[in-house]
Image (cartoon, coloured by chain):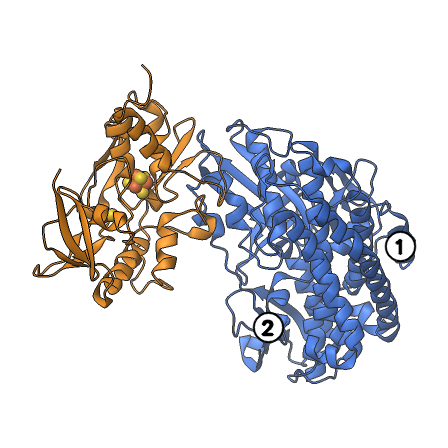
Chain colours: A blue, B orange
């Protein structure tokens, strides 16, 4: 029996990090647990509601990625109606998802992670945030903020509102894009590309300066899951699932997301409110898999667009099999921004986006519907069963932060093992633990970090469960 | 018909004998908030939003159901009335589960608009969070009891414009609810003609066209008054 360190919910309802670090008699870290204390009442209180309300209800699960829930929910609705939605509606939904990827990744990289790279691990809490970044490198900070705005503008051009757009509906979408909307996006693209390129330069420099961190910030073997197209190209919406292992071998391929239950099982862990999904046939703990940018790049064979593909080749060269360090989520995220921009550039020239037929009409034709979409943080599933009149009987949601739960645990343990010795946790170590979690860009970090640091409570637990020390901040 | 003169908010007003205070006020261009009142059908005095003060009467009266009298002195916008209106609105919100953000009528809802106009920025009462269901058995329309304020507009149009008599009220007090025929699923109703007038009449998101998603229900209840007028004035060639 060892000792334990906790990082706990302090303020804010949505998303707190609570971390326990277990020490043995000699003061060595034996294990760590990362608990997500997240509100999960949605699945219950949606019961009895008409399924058509779900996109707008679930879009309120998260203020940062409402689009992901909106799209997954609308797709689950399409499945209940058993319709193929009009092609233009599908293209518009994809365009919105690309905008979402750009804005969310820009937030993760510039607002949340760049301060650590630019200001360093030892920078005081008060300045190691986006405001400190603005003071240290105003041009970069401004470019990052504008890139995020660009993504939001795409969402707004389609949904009419930046946050919670009630736009995607079962059967399609409610409105198309105007010529002005297209023109605005077209106009801002060159600047967005330039920002993405400069972020990549910053990343390479950060990687150079943080070789040690790159080796221990979640560097372990696991499976990776995400969507690919039929020919194995990177995909963000409407694709099939693929699982790849650390060696880079495909473990399962072209799985219809509706059959996710055949491949993914969920266990509920006592320490966390989050469900812990794992790859079914391998069981726990071997069935651990990661989702999100790193996973999507590990499972695909190409990005499918030239500029991102050039960078993708450099990414693949970092490892013979899959790229296993979670520190490289940052790189993957930037490559995805680049790819998203290239796909946006193509999409806005498509004349079909202006067609009027955007919504299929049908009643309830199937009593279960699964909708999946690649959210910026990873694959999101919405699984609904309804009664014949379309009222929800059960709802199951698997969110990206859930898929990555086990991997985040391991990452924290790995960092703690490396940096924690005895019952002291210096600030720079807390900062590294925080960053280790932030590599996954879990919902809790985005909702709490923009204005400062992640609220967390680290408890060091000694042999026999004795609490040796608690460090709280936030 | 003889005219009567009265005073509303200090303004001399005359209206036909038999008119309600609400009708007299509308004619004089004075706005009184209403919710259960619907042009084209008789009034029920169900919502209590149109309460007014009448000098010499020591209780508040509903403008939609009180007939005018010669020399009557009416006040429609006093401190006390504003206070009661806000209270009434807050109670309506607290009684059931309205959740505007996910509602089909968000942005086009009479209840929401009134709350906004009357400065209701929060609800001081505890929400009841009752367990009401949604009836989605009708092929075209749905009824979400969570959003019903029991104004009975749907009942009145169903009986007195369509003449089907499908909709009714069952139960008592806060537990009252709208039923179809003998409290059976709407889709099983034998009297419902699927005319949709109740849906047009509903001031909230309680009655809706199936398949509509958040903020999509826009209705034009003036169509109902149009039908009634056309019928009563025999504007239709039969
Ligand atoms: S269903 Fe609508 S119209 Fe009928 S009583 Fe309820 S709120 Fe009024
Ligand atoms: S409008 Fe008079 S009581 Fe409702």
Identity of the residue drawn at 74% across and 65% down: A146
Q: Nearer the viewer, mark 1 or mark 2?
A: 1
Label 1 residue SS: helix
Is A381 situated above or below A272?
A: above
Dot 1 and dot 2 within a common chain: yes
Counting from the top left corner in percent of width and height, residue A44 is at 45, 49
State the residue in front, B11 or B97: B11
The reply to whether residue A4 is visible in this rendering is yes
Tell which of B186 and A79 is nearer to you.
B186
**Position of residue A89 measured from the top left corner of the image (x, y, whole percent):** 66, 37
**x, y percent for residue A331:** 82, 61
Crowdedness of circle 1 by 10 Å Cα count: few (<14), some, many (20+)? Answer: some
Q: Which residue is mark 2?
A: A1
| Element carrying mark 2 | loop
Where is residue B106? Give x, y as percent.
45, 48
Q: Can you name the residue that lies furthest to the top here? A: B238
Up-down: is A354 above or below B5? above
Q: Which residue is mark 1?
A: A316
- Using the numbered discs, state the Cα–Cα distance from disc 1 to disc 2 in whole angstroms: 41 Å
Q: Chain of mark 2?
A: A
- Tell me: residue A264, above or below residue A15: above
Q: Which mark is residue B156?
A: none
In the rendered image, is residue A28 in sight? no
Answer whether labels 1 and 2 touch (C-beta < 8 Å): no
In this picture, is B183 found above or below A252? above
Question: Residue at 43% across / 28% down in the picture?
Answer: B140
Number of numbered markers? 2
For the residue carrying disc 2, how many other residues have a C-alpha within 10 Å: few (<14), some (14-19), or many (20+)? some
Relative to the observer, which residue lies in front, A17 or A23? A17
Quarter that holds the N terminus of chain A: bottom right
- Is label 2's Cβ within 8 Å of ligand 1? no
Dot 1 or dot 2: first in sequence order is 2
């Amino acid at each position: 029996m060892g000792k334990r360190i906790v990082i706990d919910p302090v303020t804010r309802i949505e998303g707190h990090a609570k971390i326990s670090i277990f020490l043995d008699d000699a003061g060595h870290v034996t294990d760590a647990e990362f608990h997500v204390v997240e509100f999960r009442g949605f699945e219950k209180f949606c019961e009895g509601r008409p399924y058509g309300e779900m996109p707008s209800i679930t879009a309120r699960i998260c203020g940062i990625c409402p689009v992901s829930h909106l799209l997954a929910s609308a797709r689950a609705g399409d499945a209940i109606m058993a319709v193929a939605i009009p092609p233009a509606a599908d293209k518009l939904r994809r365009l919105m998802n690309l905008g979402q990827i750009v804005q969310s990744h820009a937030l993760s990289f510039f607002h949340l992670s760049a301060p650590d790279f630019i200001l360093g691990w030892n920078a005081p809490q008060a300045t190691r945030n986006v405001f400190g970044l603005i003071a240290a490198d105003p041009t970069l900070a401004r470019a990052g903020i504008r890139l995020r705005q660009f993504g939001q503008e795409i969402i707004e051009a389609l949904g009419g509102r930046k946050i919670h757009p009630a736009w995607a509906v079962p059967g399609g979408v409610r409105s198309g894009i105007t010529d002005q909307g297209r023109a605005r996006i077209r106009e801002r693209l060159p600047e967005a590309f330039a920002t993405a390129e400069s972020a990549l330069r910053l990343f390479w420099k950060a990687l150079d300066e943080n070789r040690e961190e790159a080796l221990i910030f979640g560097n372990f073997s696991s499976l990776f899951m995400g969507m690919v197209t039929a020919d194995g190209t990177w995909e963000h919406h409407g694709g099939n699932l693929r699982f790849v292992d650390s060696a880079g071998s495909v473990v399962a391929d072209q799985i219809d997301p509706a059959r996710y239950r055949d491949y993914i099982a969920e266990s509920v862990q006592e320490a966390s409110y989050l469900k812990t999904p794992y790859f079914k046939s391998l069981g726990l703990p071997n069935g651990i898999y990661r989702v999100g940018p790193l996973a999507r790049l590990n499972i695909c064979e190409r990005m499918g667009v030239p500029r991102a593909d050039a960078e993708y080749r450099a990414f693949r060269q970092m490892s013979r099999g899959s790229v296993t360090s979670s520190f490289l989520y940052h790189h993957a995220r930037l490559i995805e921004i680049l790819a998203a921009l290239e796909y946006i550039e193509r999409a806005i020239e498509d004349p079909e986006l202006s067609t009027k037929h955007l919504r299929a009409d049908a009643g309830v034709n199937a009593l279960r519907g699964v909708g999946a979409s690649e959210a910026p943080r990873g694959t999101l599933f919405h699984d609904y069963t309804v009664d014949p009149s379309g009222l929800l009987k059960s709802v199951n949601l698997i969110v990206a932060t859930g898929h990555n739960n086990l991997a985040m645990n391991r990452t924290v343990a790995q960092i703690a093992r490396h940096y924690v010795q005895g019952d002291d946790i210096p600030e720079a170590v807390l900062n590294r633990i925080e960053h280790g979690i932030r590599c996954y860009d879990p919902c809790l970090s985005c909702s709490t970090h923009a204005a400062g640091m992640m609220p967390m409570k680290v408890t060091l637990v000694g042999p026999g469960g004795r609490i040796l020390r608690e460090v709280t901040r936030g | 018909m003889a005219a009567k003169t009265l005073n509303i908010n200090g303004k001399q007003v005359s209206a036909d004998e038999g008119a309600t205070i609400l009708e007299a006020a509308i004619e004089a261009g004075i706005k009184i908030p209403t919710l259960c009142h619907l042009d084209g059908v008789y009034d029920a005095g169900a919502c209590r939003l149109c309460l007014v003060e009448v000098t010499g009467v020591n209780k508040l009266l509903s403008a939609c159901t009180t007939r005018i009298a010669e020399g009557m002195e009416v006040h429609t916008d006093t401190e006390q009335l504003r206070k009661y209106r806000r209270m009434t609105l807050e109670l309506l919100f607290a009684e059931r589960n309205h959740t505007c953000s996910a509602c089909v009528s968000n942005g086009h809802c009479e209840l929401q608009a009134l709350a906004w106009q009357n400065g209701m920025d929060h609800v001081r009462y505890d929400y009841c969070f009752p367990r009401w269901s949604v009836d989605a058995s009708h092929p075209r329309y749905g009824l979400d009891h969570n959003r019903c304020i029991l104004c009975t507009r749907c009942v009145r149009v169903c009986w007195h414009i369509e003449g089907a008599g499908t909709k009714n009220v069952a139960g008592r007090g806060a537990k009252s609810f709208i039923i179809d025929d003998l409290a059976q699923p709407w889709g099983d109703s034998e009297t419902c003609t699927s005319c949709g007038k109740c849906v047009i009449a509903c001031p909230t998101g309680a009655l809706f066209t199936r398949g509509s998603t958040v903020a999509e229900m826009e209705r034009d209840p003036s169509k109902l008054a149009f039908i009634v007028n056309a019928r009563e004035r025999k504007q239709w060639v039969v």
